[in-house]
């Protein structure tokens, strides 16, 4: 290797490290969001749009900060309902995927039912859950579980079957039991597929909890959205939406972080 090429590589290293640093993932969306909010603020001031139609970002910010504890408390309730629903839906989906991955008969029997649940609108089912399970947190958890069930089921079933034939033959040559093959081969092979499903399902669980709160109870961000909409209180409504967005973004980032930590050996977790 020539001296000139090594010098060029050293010169290129700082710039390439900039694009792979954490700032490269934080600064661009922050700049884009700040620009959007500035344009939004300026346009509303020039057009003199009434606050009950579309509030300015500064008004929403003041409303959110002035009553931060209120939104944090309701946001915590929605978060717990969403996480409970996600845990329930993902757990049932993983059990169902395990059964269907080992039996074509069960797959043909249960998958159409899962598809039927998937295509049924959540808004149509939510009032029934309120009638059946009351006005507490239980119907919201079930709705969140229902909306997160199908993505985890499909990805888990695909991942449990996506094993290397050579590795499977090796385990069988060692007379490994089906339990050992599942725990040591199929489940680790399915983890990339599961985390891909989790990235989709975790934000969906927040949506499911909010939809449940529209129909039951007086707690949670969903109830705030409904009441604020009825009163044309747009600053409160947008403050609740911002809190929901914060919850969804935080949960998604935590999922990415766990994926990088757990799947450090997989190509999907390697930063290029």
Image (cartoon, rainbow, N blue to C red):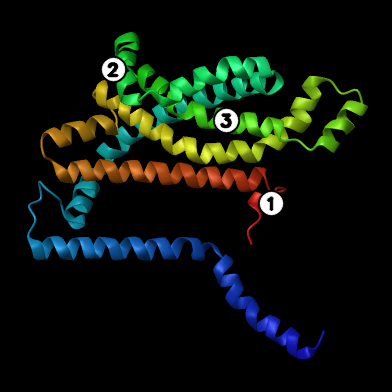
- Looking at the rendering, which quadrant does residue 8 occupy? bottom right
Give the number of marks.
3
Pointer 3 and pointer 2: residues touching (CB < 8 Å)? no
The C terminus, quarter of image: bottom right
The residue that mark 1 highlights is 267
Mark 1 is surrounded, within 10 Å at the Cα level, by few (under 14), some (14 to 19) or many (20 or more) other residues, namely: few
- Choose the circle earlier in sequence order: 2 or 1: 2
Mark 2 is surrounded, within 10 Å at the Cα level, by few (under 14), some (14 to 19) or many (20 or more) other residues, namely: some
**Can the viewer see residue 85?**
yes
The residue that mark 2 highlights is 127
Residue 64 in picture, x, y percent from top left: 23, 47
Q: Secondary structure at mark 2?
A: helix
Q: CA distance from mark 3 to mark 1?
A: 21 Å
In this view, the residue in front, 239 or 145, is 145
Q: Residue at x 56, y 27 (%)?
A: 153
Q: Secondary structure at mark 1?
A: helix
Q: Residue at x 37, y 66 (%)?
A: 31
The N terminus, quarter of image: bottom right
- Choose the circle earlier in sequence order: 3 or 2: 2
168 relative to 63 in the view: left or right: right
Residue 268 in picture, x, y percent from top left: 64, 50
Q: Is residue 243 above or below residue 101?
A: below
Between circles 3 and 1, the one closer to the viewer is 3
The residue that mark 3 highlights is 154
**Can the viewer see residue 77?**
no
48 relative to 169 in the view: left or right: left
Q: Residue at x 80, y 24 (%)?
A: 180
74 relative to 165 in the view: left or right: left
């Amino acid at each position: 290797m020539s001296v000139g090429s090594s010098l060029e590589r050293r010169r290129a290293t700082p710039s390439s490290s900039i694009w792979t640093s954490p700032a490269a993932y934080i600064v661009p969306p922050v700049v884009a969001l700040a620009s959007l909010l500035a344009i939004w603020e300026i346009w509303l001031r020039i057009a003199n749009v009434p606050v009950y139609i579309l509030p300015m970002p500064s008004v929403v910010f003041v409303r959110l900060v002035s009553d931060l504890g209120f939104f944090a408390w309701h946001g915590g309730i929605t978060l717990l309902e969403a996480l409970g629903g996600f845990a329930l839906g993902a757990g049932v989906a993983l059990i169902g995927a395990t059964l269907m991955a080992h039996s074509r008969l069960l797959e043909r029997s249960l998958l159409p039912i899962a598809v039927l649940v998937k295509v049924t609108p959540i808004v149509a089912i939510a009032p029934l859950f309120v009638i059946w399970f009351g006005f507490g947190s239980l119907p919201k958890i079930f709705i969140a579980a229902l909306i997160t069930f199908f993505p985890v089921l499909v990805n888990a079933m695909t991942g449990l079957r996506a094993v290397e034939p050579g590795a499977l033959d090796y385990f069988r040559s060692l007379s490994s039991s089906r339990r050992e093959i599942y725990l040591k081969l199929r489940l680790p092979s399915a983890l990339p597929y599961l985390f891909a499903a989790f990235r989709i399902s975790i934000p969906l669980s927040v949506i499911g909890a909010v939809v449940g709160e529209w129909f039951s109870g007086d707690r949670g961000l969903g109830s705030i959205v409904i009441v604020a909409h009825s009163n044309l209180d747009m600053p409160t409504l947008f403050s609740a939406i911002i809190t929901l967005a914060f919850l969804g973004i935080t949960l998604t980032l935590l999922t990415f972080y766990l994926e990088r930590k757990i799947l450090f050996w997989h190509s999907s977790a390697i930063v290029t």
